[in-house]
Amino acid sequence: MSAPTISTTQFTLRGRVARDLMTPTPTCVFNTDPLRSAAEFLARNSAVPVVDTDRRVIGVLSRTDLARALSDAIQAVVPSLQLERRPDHEEDVVTEYQPPGKRIGDAMTPHVVTVLAETPIVEVVRILAQKRIGRVFVVDAEQHLLGVVSATDVIGRLSPAE
């Protein structure tokens, strides 16, 4: 009895370096922006790079970071929340709650993975896979944000090898 044959498909990744794959000038937020300003963006995206006033990447704000910050704020004020029953609703409604006045820099993750624009694509893919992350931010030598390479960008540049 012979061993089963396994068919494999090889793919080619079009491009040489991170610059070839990146989405240029991605939306970013400043560490001094109010935390609530990032909520709308994070409703559509899983994370956003955080930059300082010189547009140097200093962190990343994810949905998880935002949820954690809001959870901490809610837990801090729960004893003071007032519930009221509204006749037109079946549920209790929380009143007198204001989102926290925190800044993005208070909630961001300061450890961010970056690559230079000239980093070989093979290295970018290795970083994404080994660190199990969805994106790396592309920076210049001074850490200024140039772009982002996501796992979706990598997949979009794959084509079956001939």
Image (spheres, grey):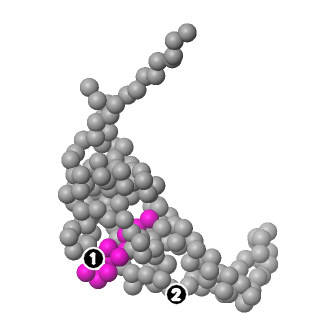
Other-residue count near label 1 (Cα within 10 Å), few / some / many at <14 / 14–19 / ≥20: some
Q: Amino acid at mark 2?
A: Gly
* Residue 112, position as x, y percentages in the image: 39, 69
Q: Determine the image quadrant of residue 162.
A: top left
Where, quadrant-wise, is the N terminus in this rendering? top right
91 or 77: nearer the viewer: 77
Which residue is under mark 2? 101
Q: Secondary structure at mark 2?
A: loop
- Percent position of residue 31, x then y: 39, 81
The answer to whether the residues at label 1 and label 2 have Cβ atoms under 8 Å apart is: no
Magenta stretch bounds: 47-58
Residue 50 location, quadrant: bottom left
What residue is drawn where x is 26% and y is 72%?
Answer: 143
11 left or right of 40? Answer: left
Q: Residue at left 65%, top 81%?
A: 74
Q: CA distance from mark 1 to mark 2?
A: 23 Å
Q: Is residue 6 left or right of residue 11?
A: right
Comparing 124 with 98, the one in front is 124
Q: Nearer the viewer, residue 25 or 124?
A: 124
Badge 2: how crowded within 10 Å, few (<14), some, or many (20+)?
few
Amino acid type, residue under disc 1 in the picture: Arg
Percent x, y for residue 134? 43, 56
**Residue 49 within the magenta-colored segment of the rendering:** yes
Residue, x 24% and y 72% (percent of image)? Answer: 144
Vertical comparison of 51 with 147: above or below: below
| Label 1 or label 2, whichever comes before in sequence order | 1
